[in-house]
Image (tube, rainbow, N blue to C red):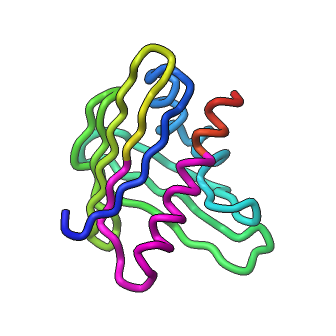
Amino acid sequence: MQNAITVEATINAPVEKVWSFWTEPKHITQWCQASDDWHAPHAENDVRIDGKFSTTMAAKDGSFSFDFGGVYTGVELNKLIEYTMGDGRKVKITFTGEGNTTKVVETFEPESQNSLEMQQGGWQAILNNFKKYTEQH
């Protein structure tokens, strides 16, 4: 991946729990936002090669929303998710479980509208929300 950006977090939970919280729509809608003034009111996820996913991300005040989605190109249960976003950019996520902790590493191709720092910060904020949600439930 060219000019790829990587974000990562270690979640205090076993890999099976981390995987299900990452992939099940009932959980995705609880953690998939970068800040408290946003939310994810809808998510669909078909976690298999050629399966599609879509998450609606929206400002809580109703001023803006968009669908984040793509098609899976690689899936290994509790280990790996790869997908291509709607705009053609590629993403790779690895899940490395070790007892009651799981390291999640997400690598993605940046888009050209926002700075690399802003993109990394946004994706890291979402991953941090995922960590917080998973550890609290």
Measured as percent of width and height from the top left, residue 125 is found at 58, 57
Residue in the image at 22% along x and 49% along y: 73
Judge from the rendering whether residue 33 lies leftward or rightward of residue 77; answer left or right: right
Residue extending farthest to the bottom is 113
Percent coordinates x, y for residue 103 in the rendering: 42, 33
Q: Is residue 117 above or below residue 124?
A: below
Choose between 67 and 107: the one closer to the eye. Answer: 107
- The segment highlighted magenta reads 106-129
Is 86 located above or below residue 43 in the figure? Answer: below
Q: Residue at x 56, y 72 (%)?
A: 66
Q: Quadrant of residue 39?
A: bottom right
From this viewpoint, which residue is outermost toward the right? 61
Give the image location of residue 26, x and y in percent: 62, 39
The answer to whether residue 110 is magenta is yes
Q: Quadrant of the N terminus?
A: bottom left
Residue drawn at 48 percent across, 41 percent down = 9
- Observer-nearest of 129 and 77: 129
* Foreground of the two, 88 or 9: 9
Is residue 86 one of those drawn in magenta? no
Q: List x then y, in percent, for residue 62.
A: 76, 75
Residue at screen point 59% across, 52% down: 32
Outermost left residue: 1
